[in-house]
Image (tube, helix red, strand yellow):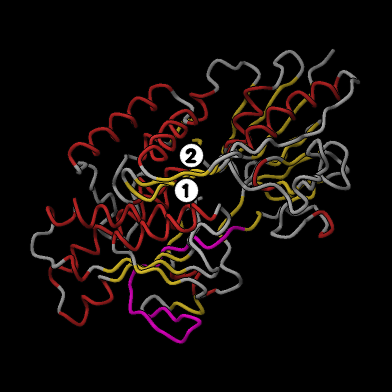
Amino acid sequence: MAKKKIIIVGGGFAGIQLTRNLDERLFDVLLIDKLNHHQFQPLFYQVATSQIEPSSISFPLRNIFKNKSNVQIRLAEVLSVDKLKNTLSTTIGDFEYDYLVMAVGCKTNFFGNENIAKNAFTLKSTYEAITIRNHILQTFEKVISSNDFEKESLLNLVIVGAGPTGVELSGAFTEIKKHVLPKDYKGIDFSKFKIILVEGSKHTLNAMSDVAKKASHAYLTQMGVEVYTETFVKDYDGELLTLSNGNQIKTKTVLWAAGVTGNRIEGFSDDVYAQGSRFKVNRINQVAETENIFAVGDIAFMTTPKYPKGHPQLANVAINQAKLLAKNLKAISENKKTKEFEYKDLGSMATVGTNKAVVDLPFVSFKGYFAWLVWMFLHLMLILSVRNKLIIFINWAWAYVTKDTSLRLILSDSNKKDQPTDGQSS
């Protein structure tokens, strides 16, 4: 029996797990991504704050699948899908498929505000994490030689969105403000460096438990973060941030972590998309109105009795959907019965700083040092490469003991503003 051709678009958590788990005897796999590496998104904030190096959380796809003879990898951007011809059009040509799996993830949602999209920094790739790191370090280089009027906007750092990314960024920046940056920039008064967190809902970590909401807010304020809740950003022109309460903040640095939306692909009708531009899928991750197209991970919107509003956009959801889809594709190819996806919530967590974290498990919520240990252990276990697990653990241990890292490199072309020389735009 000839092998079926499967195209998987996206090398994130879902794409990697699906490629790993597909039966090599039944399927030939073409994995397409714009980047040549898998990115470990939960730790982007540590790259942005100079705590770990980019190579510790970036995994070359060809190395991951070097022992998989049935896997081919192509670097390209998807342009459209022809569902009648079973072809995928990309920037490097067209490819035929028997099964197509969309694992393209989501992009930053600016809610239609073009000014914010143009002027704010985002954190959805290793490249963007490096860009933020470059910008922050270059900002303090500028502070040294700036006058008092210019310093105000340089010393105001605004983070928009108090979900896990926003909270973790805020905590990490307060730690380097206290322990790291004063050693490098001895002429700067860091008491004037403000870290401001803006959140539209009533709480930080609004999707988590009351314990997590209260603890994260308390940790952040104790650490010196100015937290504005029930406040929205109306505009940002690169110099002045305007809030819904009428206040304005002079700032050169706005980090946007306020939401995501799906990446739409030409060839699908609007009826196929749910809220947030996610593909409507059934319980085996089959895209609505199709027979041989599937979607997994953040881009998939599946309603179940337990999750009538769709599943949370978490790595564990993506991984488990991908593993089950690998089994179901095998079952489909062998004319056997498929199994419906059911997500078992293992909990959620976020870290605010060293020894400060919050963890929600199905049966209990807790905070503090033990929560931080749990967070660190589970993130290490999620990392795909054993070598990188060890490197990250050593980096964390060293930073914990010394309160310092040696990763504060500005990697940019001196002729181009804030552009890394060794990254790719996503």
Query: Along the polypeptide, which appears first: circle 1 or circle 2?
Result: 2
- For the record, the magenta segment spans 240-260
- In this picture, residue 383 sits left or right of residue 135: right
The residue lying at 24 percent from left, 53 percent from top is 176
- Between residues 158 and 35, which one lies in front from this camera angle? 158
User: Which residue lies under the disc numbered 2?
Assistant: 39
Query: Which image quarter is the N terminus in?
Result: top right
Q: Residues within 10 Å of mark 1 (few under 14, many from 20)?
A: many
User: Given the image, on which type of amino acid does mark 2 rest?
Assistant: Gln
Is disc 2 surrounded by few (<14), some (14 to 19) or many (20+) residues within 10 Å? many
Instruction: Between residue 220 and residue 8, name the one nearer to us.
Output: 220
Q: Quadrant of residue 113?
A: bottom right
Do the residues under discs 1 and 2 have CB atoms within 8 angstroms? Answer: yes
Location of residue 112 with respect to 415 vertically, above or below: below
The answer to whether 395 appears left or right of 110 in the picture is: left
Where is residue 121 drawn, in percent x and y? 42, 62
Residue found at x 83% / y 42%: 282
User: In the figure, 302 relative to 136: above or below?
Assistant: above
Tag 1 secondary structure: loop
Q: Determine the CA span between mark 1 and mark 2.
A: 7 Å
Residue 273: % across, % down: 78, 56
Residue at figure coordinates x 72%, y 53% from the top left = 278
The x, y position of residue 120, in whole percent, is: 44, 67
| Corner quadrant of residue 328 | top right
**Callout 1, which amino acid?**
Ser
Extreme residue toward the bottom, this view = 246
